[in-house]
């Protein structure tokens, strides 16, 4: 999956010009309600970094800065960007400590930003939250072919999403399965029974449509 399919376009992004004063940047941040916004150069085409509200306040209070001071020295995280053609999962490696990442096109121009909300949207999609009915959390002893065995056991139902947790654990693994919304409660109980007969342990079942847990062990 490419980043270009999942980010906020430039026209929907509030940003600050690199030549702005501290007062201009602070007023823009205060108006936007964000703790940080991107800083752009050259008529809004080149990404310069991020400006944080806390740094502007620190400039005023701790450093006794003036309204007309330049924001240049306060710009941070100049490397907080990815490219439209990068894999979306590259964001997981860098966005954790940042409020967002800038997105650049193949001409090195600013195209927009990718936010934690975008990341959550992709995770929700991987869970099948938009289409699924039941999410099963299944525990299994780690062994070669565990996922293949699980899928084979419930091959007669449609799997809307699948995610594995505890990867790298020597002994145990959790597998999250999202089953199609057309699975009946009776069918669900049969699936759980079949899985547990194959030494899989269904530890919880959530109903996506109702937004509630229907089974916990």
Image: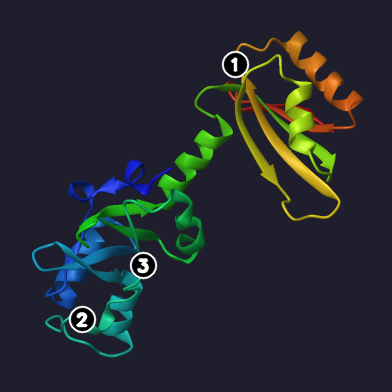
Which residue is drawn at the image coordinates 46% and 47% (left, top)? 119
Instruction: Tell me: 72 left or right of 116.
Output: left
Label 1, on which residue?
A: 181
The correct choice, above or below, for 215 with respect to 101 in the image is: above
Residue 56 location, x and y as percent? Answer: 28, 77
Asked if the residues shown at circle 2 and circle 1 are in contact, with their CB atoms under 8 angstroms apart, the answer is no
N-term-proximal mark, 3 vs 2? 2
Q: From the viewer's perspective, is the residue at label 3 or at label 2 nearer?
A: 3
Q: Nearer the viewer, residue 203 or 102?
A: 102
| Mark 3 and mark 2: Cα distance apart in space | 16 Å
Q: Looking at the rendering, in which quadrant would you find the N terminus?
A: top left
Q: Nearer the viewer, residue 109 or 211?
A: 109
Secondary structure beneath label 3? loop
**Residue 67 image position (x, y, % from top left):** 15, 80
Query: Measuring 54% from the left and 36% from the top, which residue is drawn there?
Result: 126
Mark 2 or 1, nearer chain start:
2
* Front one among 1 and 96: 1
Q: Quadrant of the C terminus?
A: top right
Q: What crowding class fits label 2: few (fewer than 14 Cα within 10 Å), some (14-19), or many (20 or more)?
A: some
Location of residue 215 in the rendering, given as x and y in whole percent from the top left corner: 78, 26
Characterize the local packing of mark 1: few (<14), some (14-19) or many (20 or more) Cα atoms within 10 angstroms.
some
In-front residue for pair 72/123 = 123
Residue at point 13%, 62% (across, down): 44
Where is residue 162, by image quadrant? top right
Q: Please tell me which of labels 3 and 1 falls first in the chain.
A: 3
Q: Which mark is residue 57?
A: none
User: Outermost residue toward the front?
Assistant: 144
Residue that badge 2 annotates: 72
Q: CA distance from mark 3 to mark 1?
A: 39 Å
């Amino acid at each position: 999956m490419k980043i270009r399919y999942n980010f906020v376009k430039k026209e929907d992004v509030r940003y600050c010009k690199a030549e702005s004063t501290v007062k201009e940047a602070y007023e823009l941040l205060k108006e936007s309600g964000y703790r940080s916004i991107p800083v752009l150069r050259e008529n809004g085409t080149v990404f310069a970094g991020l400006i944080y509200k806390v740094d502007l306040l620190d400039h005023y209070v701790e450093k006794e800065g003036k309204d007309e001071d330049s924001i240049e020295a306060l710009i941070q995280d100049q490397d907080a960007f990815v490219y439209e053609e990068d894999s979306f999962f590259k964001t997981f490696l860098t966005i954790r400590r940042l409020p967002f990442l800038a997105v650049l096109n193949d001409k090195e121009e600013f195209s927009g930003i990718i936010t934690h909300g975008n990341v959550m949207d992709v995770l929700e999609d991987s869970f099948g939250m938009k289409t699924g009915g039941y999410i099963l959390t299944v525990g299994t002893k780690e062994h070669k072919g565990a996922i293949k065995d699980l899928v084979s056991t419930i091959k007669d139902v449609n799997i809307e999403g699948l995610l594995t947790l505890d990867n790298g654990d020597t002994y145990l693994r959790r597998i999250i399965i999202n089953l199609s919304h057309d699975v009946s409660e009776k069918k669900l109980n049969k699936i759980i029974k079949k899985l547990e007969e194959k030494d899989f342990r269904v530890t919880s079942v959530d109903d996506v449509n109702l937004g509630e847990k229907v089974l916990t062990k």
